[in-house]
Structure formats: structure tokens, C-alpha cells
Image (cartoon, rainbow, N blue to C red):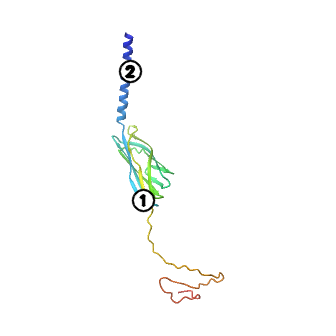
Amino acid sequence: MKHIKKTYLNKAILSLFMVMVFYIVIAVNAFAMGISISFSEVSANVGDEVTLVMTVSSTGGDIDSSTIMLSYDESMLDFISGTNAQGDAGSIKITSNTGSISNSQSFSLKFKAKSPGDATVVVSTWEVYDRDSKMATMESQGSGRIKITEAPISQTSETTTEESSVAVDKRDALLSTLKVSPGKLVPEFNSATKNY
């Protein structure tokens, strides 16, 4: 009988210990900082440089460091430069470990628009930590959109030219006729005259 009570007591203590560990793990995760990543929406013409702003903001804590990988369509965009960013060929790595702890960090990303359409910049991977080096949990994650349109056609003055088919003797390089538009040629055309 004593042996049965001891086994029962050991199981009860072990079960109570496991429940306490479970509650501690849940409590620690419940206090993890939540973050959201958002982007501005911008428009550009083909050939323009455009700046897209990405913002990482937290709820319930301050951001200490972050590493974020982005991807974009390199047939539509060329990455030029960015705040704490480096990349090319469709990928950008953004790192922030400045020591200035805040609940929001913004990163400017400069692109050159290459072809018309809706280009997107999306988060591939991310790691964001609070001041206690605890990894944050994602609450919402957006993507950047750049609407690219064809460059407007500029208005230029039109010049009218007359085309004519003239048989030319390659041994004779003398000018045979001359037309000036608008206006009048004074004196009248003469192939021997060099100044008008």
C-alpha cells in the first residue's frame, strides 16, 4: 500500500512540475514583442529613381536589432541604395543594430524603374529582437508596391522636310538645288555662290 501511494505521489509531483513548466513557457511567449512590417506605396515612370520606405514597428517593446531579407523583380527594378541596406540581383539585406532602441525603425530603399507594371518588394526572411535579445513575433507583414508607368512622350517641335529622289552623278559634287523653309533665299541660288 505504501508503494502505491509513493508511486501516485511521484506521478502527481511530476505532473504538477510539467504543468508549471508549461505555464512558464506560455507566459514568456505571451510577453514576446510583436512587430509589423509595412511599406509605402509609390509611383514612378520608366527611367525614374523612386524611394520606397519600409517601417518596422513594435507593440509592447522596443526594437534593438533586426535583419530583414527582401526580394524584388529585377526585370522591373534596379536597386540603387538604401538605409543600412545592400543588395542586387533581386535581393536586399537590411541590418540594424545601431544601439538606439526605439519602437519603430524606418528604412529608405532607392530603386530605378526599368519597365512598366506593378513591381512588388516582399519580405523573404526576418529576425527582429528586443533589448533583452528575445526574438519578436510577427503580427502583420505587408509588401511594397511600386506602380511603374511608361514615361510620358514629350512634345517637340516638328520640322517638315521634303524628300526627293535625285539621280546623282558621283563625279559631280556640285549642289544643283537648295530650298530654305521658311523664308526666301537671297540672292537666288547659284551653284557658284558660296555665301548667302
> Identity of the amino acid at label 1?
Ala
Q: With respect to residue 135, does 109 lie above or below? A: below
Tell me the quarter of the image containing the N terminus: top left
Residue at 38%, 21% in the rendered image: 14
Q: Amino acid at mark 2?
A: Leu
Q: Quadrant of residue 2?
A: top left
Q: Which residue is depicted at the point 36% across and 40% down?
A: 34
Percent x, y for residue 13?
A: 36, 20
Q: Is residue 42 above or below residue 3?
A: below
- Mark identifier at residue 14: 2
Crowding near the residue tagged with mark 1, few <14, some 14–19, many ≥20 C-alpha atoms within 10 Å = many
Residue pushed farthest right?
171
Badges 1 and 2: C-beta atoms under 8 Å apart? no
Marks 1 and 2 sit apart, C-alpha to C-alpha, by 64 Å
Which residue carries the number 1 mark?
A: 44
Q: Residue 150: where, in percent of width, then height? A: 45, 62
Taking the view exactly as shown, the residue that stands out farthest to the bottom is 187
User: In this picture, is 59 found above or below 179?
Assistant: above
User: As drawn, which residue projects farthest toward the top?
Assistant: 1
Q: Secondary structure at mark 2?
A: helix
Q: Position of residue 77 (x, y in %)?
A: 47, 55
* Camera-side residue of 140 and 167: 167
Residue at point 38%, 17% (across, down): 10
